[in-house]
Image (spheres, rainbow, N blue to C red):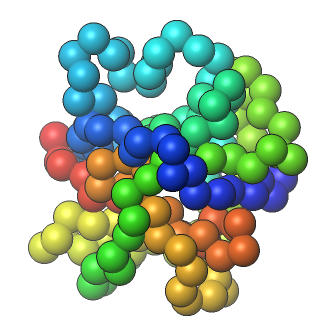
Amino acid sequence: MRAQFEVAPLLAPVEGTTVYRKSEYSIDFIPKRRDVPPLSIGHRPKASLAIGMLQLEVDIESRQVLYPWGYFPSVSWKPGSVVPPPAIRNGLQVAGGTILREGVSETLWDRSLLETRFDRSSGWLELRLLGGAEGGTLVEFASNCIATLAHGALRSLYVKCQWQ
């Protein structure tokens, strides 16, 4: 599946904190609002898009990409400098031609197509499609979660995690 994405200026980025749970080898997103439970912003149907085993949670009705979460072991990350370029703060949507099914995770990128770098000094993690072109539109769709789009395709993802 090759989902297409678009910047959604009328949708606000999801506010919260991304954490890396070392004991679980997982990334989790904790929404800022206390009345919103994690992994369930609102009570609307959700789907997800998988980057390896990492998920991008998507609200089916609005098609808004909400946040990353899931199993993503740090033992496979390569050390390196990661400084995300400046990004616009907007919502991110899955384009209308992509079919989203409730409770289903569709593969966006296989793990074998992924290059992962982590900058211990800044806390930024970069997931990049191997052979992906530099440049594109950068959008911060959730707090400290930045997607790079090139002609509607996701080319990279930057995530800044707090370690727990």
Q: Is residue 59 above or below residue 154?
A: above
Is 145 displayed left or right of 152 in the figure?
Answer: left
State which quadrant residue 109 falls in: bottom right
Q: Position of residue 125 (x, y in %)?
A: 34, 65
Q: Is residue 114 above or below residue 160?
A: below
Looking at the picture, tell me which residue is in the foreground, 134 or 21.
134
Residue beneath the point at 47% across and 15% down: 42
Is 70 displayed left or right of 22 in the figure?
Answer: right
Task: Please give the count of numbered marks on the rendered protein.
Answer: 0
Q: Position of residue 23 (x, y in %)?
A: 26, 38
Q: Is residue 137 visible?
A: yes
Q: Is residue 23 above or below residue 80?
A: above
State which quadrant residue 140 falls in: bottom left
Residue beneath the point at 35% across and 15% down: 37
Q: Is residue 53 visible?
A: no
Looking at the picture, tell me which residue is in the foreground, 142 or 132.
142
Residue beneath the point at 57% across and 80% down: 136
State which quadrant residue 84 falls in: bottom left
